[in-house]
Amino acid sequence: MIIAIDGYSSTGKSTFAKLIAARLGLIYLDSGAIYRTVTLFALQSGYITGNVIDNEALKQDIDSGKMKISYSMDNPEGRAEICLNGVNVESRIRLLDVSDNVSPIATIPFVRNFVDSLLRGYGPQGVVMDGRDIGTAVFPEADLKIFMVADAKIRAQRRVDQLVAKGEKADFDEIYRNVLERDYIDSHREMNPLRQAEDAVVLDNSYVSVEQQMIWIGWVLKAKLDIDF
Ligand code: DC
């Protein structure tokens, strides 16, 4: 079974997807984390200067296998955490330097092809995957597609709260600008932009708690796939 959860940034896709995966015994995969890890690699390699990305150097490193992405299970909850060349970068990729540069990296076709083939490899195991184009491009045949939306200011505040909880600095205005900018880039890029699949079910969780979302998904799974949740 493949459940695709797409939507705007900071709509709570990963929280929602993780809970569904745990309840259904499926793997959870965060496709955005892979784009973030590619971005971190490009930053650390000096391939991003202002708005300019050295596409050729990045492509060479991806093609030659110099950039290795893997998963570690070395955490108390047994969650899969993403590693770049053997180093766990699950927290590092959430910092603002990566957030600021990830959308342009995610517009590059060879990056998208690399990430898509990595993601498709997990399909046969049964997966709940979140991202921007999972239901439209990565798994257009997914059993269930959810499209998540929420008010942009509420999303910015959620991101501030997450950073503060981790002891990071967080400026609301800067983060709000980042949210709007990422929405624009994500939905206007040429290759596989963020858009709602025709057969997706929309969830606006601006004013909806996680508990209420779990009740909602129970109804959707029953109605669409006859699954008791
Ligand atoms: O979900 P996130 O904010 O961690 O995603 C980071 C970026 O990755 C986001 O700005 C767009 C990109 N992305 C994408 O283009 N396609 C996906 N399937 C997932 C993420």
Image (spheres, rainbow, N blue to C red):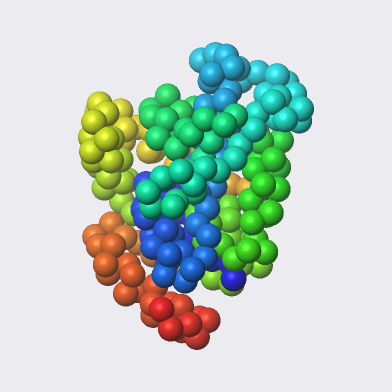
- The image quadrant of residue 4 is bottom right
Position above or below: 138 against 2 = above
In front of the other: 37 or 220: 37
Q: Viewer-proximal residue, 72 or 177?
A: 72
Up the image or down, 220 lies above or below 35; here it is below
Is residue 76 visible in the rendered image? The answer is: yes
Q: Quadrant of residue 71?
A: top right
In the rendered view of the protein, which quadrant contains the N terminus? bottom right
Q: Quadrant of the C terminus?
A: bottom left
Q: Quadrant of residue 52?
A: top right
Spot occupied by residue 114 in the image (x, y as percentages of width and height): 69, 40
Residue pictured at 38% horizontal, 29% vertical: 95
Q: At which x and y percent is residue 51?
A: 54, 19
**For this view, does 152 lie left or right of residue 8?**
left
Left/right of residue 102 with respect to residue 11 in the rendered view = right
Q: Residue at x 46, y 28 (%)?
A: 98
Residue 131 visible from this viewpoint: no
Across and down, in percent, residue 46 comes to 57, 14
Percent x, y for residue 110? Answer: 71, 35
